[in-house]
Image (cartoon, rainbow, N blue to C red):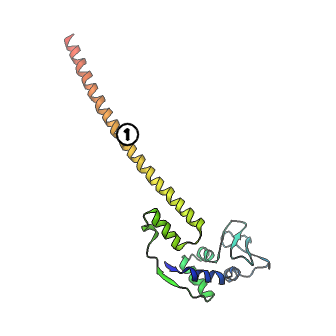
Amino acid sequence: MKIFSKESLAELSNNVLLNNVLECFLGDSEVEAAMYYECPYCGANELLVNKNNSNYYCWECGAHGDAVSFLMNVNKLAFDEAVEVLAEMYDVELDVLGPRSTPLKNVQTPDALRDFLFDFIDSPSIIHSVLVNYATNVQRKIDREKDKELMEEINVQQKKKTKKGARKSKKTNRKAKKDTKSS
């Protein structure tokens, strides 16, 4: 996956008119002030785009997003592919910083994750939700390990009790045999 500079993505975002993108893929809208299109997700004629807004919202199914997410979802494109399509449509030159050098799955510590996210995501709310999800998953892993250790300890204790009980029953059986022999 390619990494683009924040500046070139900002330039693309400033140049992209969502209405034009939707018209290319969905045809003309019939309303002027607020444009409604047939939603490619649910088929209802409820996909709203305001002329001054760069986002869409379907009142029927709740689908929403911007031009990049629209291309990603409708045309099944990766983020970098959708960005390149829009850049070509709007004749915007993108600064490609290179392929992602640190895949997210190789980020092992919370600090490394935070640094990774701040490098590539501008939205604090998205960063917050990713970090909360990460912390929740880490806590679940810790809880599973604690549960596993607890179960192992319970099994050890049960084995000890079983051995003790077996010894007591052997002693009781020997004592009972002695008592029956002596009588």
Q: Does 59 sit above or below residue 141?
A: below
Q: Which corner quadrant of the image does residue 14 belong to?
A: bottom right
> Which type of secondary structure does the marked residue at label 1 adopt?
helix
Q: Does 158 sit above or below residue 141?
A: above
Q: Which corner quadrant of the image does residue 128 belong to?
A: bottom right
Query: Residue farthest to the top?
Result: 183
Q: Is residue 88 left or right of residue 166?
A: right
Residue at image location 49% in from the left, 69% down from the top: 115
Q: Position of residue 57 (x, y in %)?
A: 70, 70
Which quarter of the figure is the C terminus placed in? top left
Residue at image location 61% in from the left, 89% down from the top: 91
- Please, what is the three-letter code of the amino acid marked with disc 1? Ile
In the picture of the structure, the residue carrying the numbered disc 1 is 154
Q: Which corner quadrant of the image does residue 5 belong to?
A: bottom right
How many discs mark residues in the rendered view?
1
Give the crowd class for mark 1: few <14, some 14-19, many >=20 residues within 10 Å: few
Q: In this view, does 51 lie to the left or right of 147?
A: right
Q: Nearer the viewer, residue 7 or 96?
A: 7
Q: Where is residue 69 in the image (x, y as percent from the top left)?
A: 61, 74
Q: Nearer the viewer, residue 120 or 73?
A: 120
Q: Does 177 sit above or below residue 50?
A: above
Q: Position of residue 94 (x, y in %)?
A: 55, 85
Q: Nearer the viewer, residue 119 or 72?
A: 119
Residue at image location 71% in from the left, 80% down from the top: 19
Q: Where is residue 170 in the image (x, y as percent from the top left)?
A: 25, 25
Query: Residue farthest to the left?
Result: 182
Q: Is residue 74 left or right of residue 49?
A: left
